[in-house]
Amino acid sequence: MVSRVIPVEPFDLVIFGATGDLARRKILPGLYRRFCAGQMPEGARIIGAARSDLDDAAFRELVREAIAEFGNGAPCETQTLDGFLEALSYVTVDARGEGGWQALKDALRPDEAVVRAFYFSVGPGLFGDLAERLHAHGLARDTSRVVVEKPFGRDLASAKALNAELAKHFNEEQIYRIDHYLGKETVQNLMAVRFGNVLFEPLWNSQYIDHIQITVSETVSVEGRGAYYDKSGAMRDMVQNHLMQLLCLIAMEPPSRFNPDAVRDEKLKVIRALAPVETHHIVRGQYEAEGDTGSYRDHAEDPRSTTESFVALRTQIENWRWAGTPFYLRTGKRLRARMSEITVVFKPTRHSIFDIGEGEDVHSNMLHIRLQPNEGMTMDVTIKEPGPGGMRLITVPLDMTFAQALGPEAEEVPDAYERLIMDVIRGNQTLFMRGDEVEAAWAWTDPVIEGWKTRGDVPKPYEPGTAGPEDALMLMHRDGRRWREIRK
Ligand code: NAP
């Protein structure tokens, strides 16, 4: 199997915030890898923009260092790196000032055939300023694209305000709201698995599925960015966007076509069908200290912080397909292992022809879709335990690690940012969130967060290296179910 790299159209990509952390860690090294892969055409230009007073040479040096540090040892010759750096230039510009815009305009090519894109890799407080000045100074065309970073608001009101600010100057087809989770290979695979195979879809409903669990667990703490994180918490930082997107892809109806609006329409329907989360169906946690490492509150630099570093909840999708099948979502920091996994637990066979001994489990099929690490799928199937002594049943995993199945090619898949930036240039919005989708997600999240505030809810402490607070286990146990083990 040979991977196909189709070069994109020539483009001028302006990165606002080009000297910042995200640009240095992800965007610029990602573009470099696409350059190495031959996807960037000859006529591609990248223009860095920020307030720092740099010239082209100093910016290229900054990018060279960023690639050395964050490029994951991209397989490129020095010559190729120089070729990439030649495509870069820099303009000093303040999103809130009037200087530098003419210079930026001069750096852009007037040719309509050159795709023009503006990446807002700056705080959301600057989105409106940038949108306004791009128009006022005549840089934005009807065909220009803008890429905006997460977080897209911190509640419904602020998300609506951001949408309104952008909508003053750009229409929805021009706006690309990034959730980098959607750029992950396995996340897209969810759609391929569901809609490219006949096997799963007939069983994909509450008649056959007992429940679905989604876990995104991290081992890292918030140390170093605790003060920033403390203003958001796991519900805003992870559930409202990443886990919500996974939930949509696993639960949505088949779109009529794999095109941006058909896919996003179906995702939106899922979010709108979500039942409000009941108070006793949600558990919040905060990690404690361990040895020399501080607790969440130490890292947040607030001994009384009530922001959660862990959340587990049960929700329901109120539609024909899913009525009666609960969805359990869980995410947290400082947990036992780094793992993102979706587990689909099927119902047991309607009638068992085998005797089930006392204390023996009723066997159910389970499909585990692992997003990280070791992306792949495992299907738990029931077989006869080998050997004499009658018909005893056991469950064995049918393991399909994509890396094994695909060989070296699986190693070469572009990272989420690379893929998403190339999609912007191609003008494909399928993997970007539409404004109404983001607002619907906040409309579901807001009452949960408001409820905590009005009740004065305090997160439960949990030991680092575990699966979170005991209450999260109870959330499942009460329903006669259990979480999938968090493991590497
Ligand atoms: P950062 O390190 O603070 O960088 C901010 C960038 O914006 C710098 O290049 C800064 O350069 C520029 N900037 C600030 N004020 C400006 C102004 N008035 N006019 C023009 N440029 C200005 O932030 P970051 O971590 O890169 O994050 C950027 C965005 O991505 C944020 O919205 C963040 O939430 C989002 N994000 C970041 C990450 C991540 O891993 N870092 C992940 C997901 C999302 P000057 O000071 O030179 O102007």
Image (tube, rainbow, N blue to C red):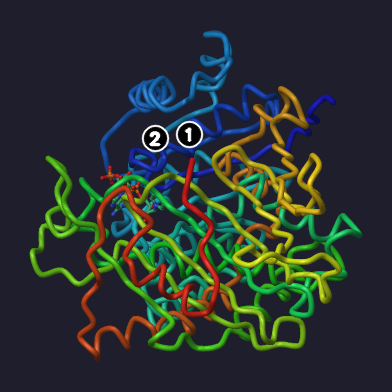
Q: Secondary structure at mark 1?
A: helix
Q: Which residue is mark 2?
A: 24
Dot 2: within a 10 Å radius of its alpha carbon, few (fewer than 14), some, or many (20 or more) residues?
Answer: many
For the residues bearing labels 2 and 1, Cβ distance under 8 angstroms:
yes
Within the image, what quadrant is residue 161 found in?
Answer: bottom left
Q: Is residue 304 left or right of residue 66?
A: left
The extreme left residue here reads 303
Indicate the position of residue 185 as horizontal and vertical percent values: 66, 44
In the image, 451 versus 76, the foreground residue is 451
The three-letter amino acid code for the residue at tag 1 is Leu
Distance between the alpha carbons at the discs numbered 2 and 1: 6 Å
Q: Ligand 1 within 8 A of label 2's CB? A: yes
Q: Secondary structure at mark 2?
A: helix
Q: Which residue is mark 1?
A: 28
Q: Is residue 238 left or right of residue 205?
A: left
Relative height, residue 448 to residue 307 (above, below): below
Relative height, residue 361 to residue 187 (above, below): below
